């Protein structure tokens, strides 16, 4: 996963914010298997009416990517 993408997700977790996936396209989010990360318990995904798919690191994901 792109280091910039990891940093963005970690900062969003610190702020307890969801990030719309459409804002992460320039960080190659489309190359990341979100289903696999969700199955591993590293991220949460949700459909938002206004923003489409949004995602957020879980606590497990925060520790995994922040180490």
Image: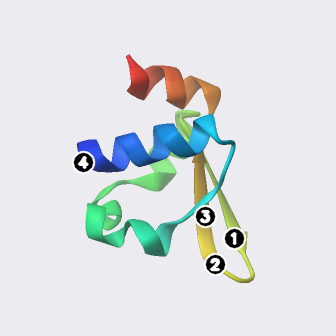
Residue that badge 3 annotates: 54
Disc 2 versus disc 3: distance between alpha carbons? Answer: 7 Å
Give the mark, 4 or 3, whose residue is nearer the N terminus. Answer: 4
Secondary structure beneath label 2: loop
Disc 4 versus disc 2: distance between alpha carbons? Answer: 22 Å
Instruction: Tell me if mark 4 has few (under 14), some (14-19) or many (20+) residues whose alpha carbon lies within 10 angstroms of its own.
Output: few
Q: Nearer the viewer, residue 34 or 63?
A: 63
Instruction: Tell me if mark 3 has few (under 14), some (14-19) or many (20+) residues whose alpha carbon lies within 10 angstroms of its own.
Output: some
Q: Residue 51 got which mark?
A: 2
The quarter of the displayed image where residue 53 is located = bottom right
| Residue plotted at (38% across, 54% down) | 33
Disc 4 versus disc 1: distance between alpha carbons? Answer: 23 Å
| Residue plotted at (50% across, 53% down) | 35
Task: Tell me: 9 left or right of 53.
Answer: left
The quarter of the displayed image where residue 31 is located = bottom left
| Residue plotted at (33% across, 67% down) | 30
Give the mark, 1 or 3, whose residue is nearer the N terminus. Answer: 1
Quarter of the image where the C terminus is located: top left
Give the mark, 4 or 1, whose residue is nearer the N terminus. Answer: 4
Residue that badge 4 annotates: 2
Q: Position of residue 4 (x, y in %)?
A: 28, 48
Residue 63 showing in the rendered view: yes
Disc 4 versus disc 3: distance between alpha carbons? Answer: 18 Å
């Amino acid at each position: 996963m792109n280091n910039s993408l990891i940093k963005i997700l970690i900062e969003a977790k610190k702020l307890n914010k969801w990030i719309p996936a459409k804002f992460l396209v320039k960080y190659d989010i489309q190359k990341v298997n979100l289903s696999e990360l969700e199955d591993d318990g590293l991220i949460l995904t949700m459909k938002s009416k206004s923003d489409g798919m949004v995602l957020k690191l879980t606590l497990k994901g925060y520790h995994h990517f922040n180490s």
